[in-house]
Amino acid sequence: MAVPPGAVWTKACVALRNELGEGAFGSWVAQAALREVDGGALVLVTQTGIARDWIRRNAWRRISELWAQHDPQGRLLELKSRFELDSEAAAAPAPAQVSAKPAAPPVGGQTAAPVIHSDSTRAARPSGLQDRFTLDSFVTGPSNEFAFAVARRVASWADGHFNPVLFHGPYGFGKTHLLNAVAAEATRAAPDKKVVYLTAERFLSTFVRALMDKQTAAFKDELRTADLLLIDDVHFIGGKQSSQEELFHTLMALMAEGRRVVLTADRPPSALTEVDARLRSHLSAGLVCGIEPADRSLRLGILERKLQLLARQHDFRRTATARPEVLEFLADRFTDSVRELEGALNTLVARLSEGVCTLTLDEAQAILRPHLRGGEKRVTVDDIQKATAEHFGLKQADLISERRNRAIARPRQAAMWLAKQLTTRSLPDIGRRFGGRDHTTVLHAVRRIEELKAADPQLTRDLETLTRKLRG
């Protein structure tokens, strides 16, 4: 007798719950449903693409093993998101694109770098690009607007360009986004030109393979015939002498012919001490564009844009907005990297799909608590009171006293705001720790500080200073 697919999945879930733990299983696997589609194919359907990707990375191999173990009929199980499955049902197959030129010969058994061929209709995209990284999806602010303007100019093939262009800044603040966006837009704007995009790691590994296979001539020709060469994370080749030498000569050859070069690094050229001095000098001689960490307003803008993209991706039926206090919590808690910031929002959407639009602050804090960095300093209300009192030249006792003069009331409100942002304490609990005040007093303080921040730059700086100090 055939075993129903649902019974097979139920048995697999029993094992998965024990192996993954209740938290991971409940957050990701339990939300998925088994569906039989046209033709009898069996698909494990997740509510979001993020949940699908998590299962694929962390549990799919084990799910496949358990499925095969409990299904005597040996039926195939696929994994897809709900939106992906619905889109496939409605989509028509796209016509194949045939390149007008043969591909470049392989270097050591693999293509040295993505080649851009043109035909009568469009250019092929460089391989390795991430579609989500476009100029339109890049959110600008004071910390990155100059770099963005330069990127847009390079992508449009404008005359009078600087060469090379180097974008530098901390990890997770948009360098890779800009480089991907430039490659894609430059390809679209000039289909007849050759655009090559690769990471420094790819440059290094392909060059080493070419040396081993005695194919360095083909490797050099592949890169030095590019109209636009883009290399991400160039600092990666620091200390690797032969690779630095090859990159140096590649840059010299390209620039001598007026071809364009754009690179990224985690530091300005002067700080790339492990990079060869000649290469470092030429990186400095072009246009060096720093990207600073995003300020609070930019982080909020990124969250709003990201939520709109996720809403389209996951087919939200409601307006793609979230409660302001939730977005502000994310913007204030995840300050070290835009990737971490987006990851926190991804986690909420993966758990709740469009329910994220009505999520309360307390619910968001509860969901994200297990995902916060384990090494992050735990901030207490007492820590906040001490730091705030010291910053404003008060005593800690002043903040919990009944005194209401402005010199004390405003720092007290700031401390309550910080307690709401940096701890998981409820409003009533925070009120009790500030001299037994009511939760409505704390709520008023939080809202008042939010209003004042928009009009008082000094208060904003005070809060950012205290936040950095408290987080260590």
Image (spheres, rainbow, N blue to C red):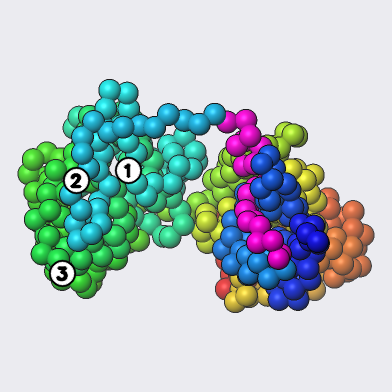
Which amino acid lies under the numbered mark 3 shown in the image of this protein?
A: Met
Q: Position of residue 452 (x, y in %)?
A: 69, 46
Please tell me whether residue 396 is drawn above or below residue 47 in the rendered image. below
Q: Which residue is mark 2?
A: 104
- Residue at point 9%, 51% (across, down): 252
Which amino acid lies under the numbered mark 1 shown in the image of this protein?
A: Pro
Q: Quadrant of the C terminus?
A: bottom right
Of the two numbered discs 1 and 3 on the same chain, state the one appearing first in sequence. Answer: 1
The region drawn magenta spans 71-91
Tell us which disc is closer to us: 1 or 2: 2
The stretch drawn in magenta includes residue 75? yes
Mark 3 residue element:
helix
Q: Is residue 233 left or right of residue 253?
A: right
Please tell me whether residue 437 is drawn above or below residue 298 in the rendered image. below
Which amino acid lies under the numbered mark 2 shown in the image of this protein?
A: Ala
Q: Which residue is mark 1?
A: 126
Mark 1 residue element:
loop
Q: Residues within 10 Å of mark 3 (few under 14, many from 20)?
A: few
User: In this orientation, which residue lies closer to the viewer: 354 or 289?
Assistant: 354
Of the two numbered discs 3 and 2 on the same chain, state the one appearing first in sequence. Answer: 2
C-alpha separation, residue under disc 1 versus residue under disc 3: 25 Å
> Do we see residue 15 in this rendering?
yes
C-alpha separation, residue under disc 1 versus residue under disc 2: 13 Å
C-alpha separation, residue under disc 3 versus residue under disc 2: 19 Å
- Residue at point 59%, 56% (across, down): 53
Q: Position of residue 420 (x, y in %)?
A: 76, 60
> Do we see residue 404 in this rendering?
no
Of the two numbered discs 1 and 2 on the same chain, state the one appearing first in sequence. Answer: 2
Q: Which residue is mark 3?
A: 212
User: In this orientation, which residue lies closer to the viewer: 471 or 59?
Assistant: 59
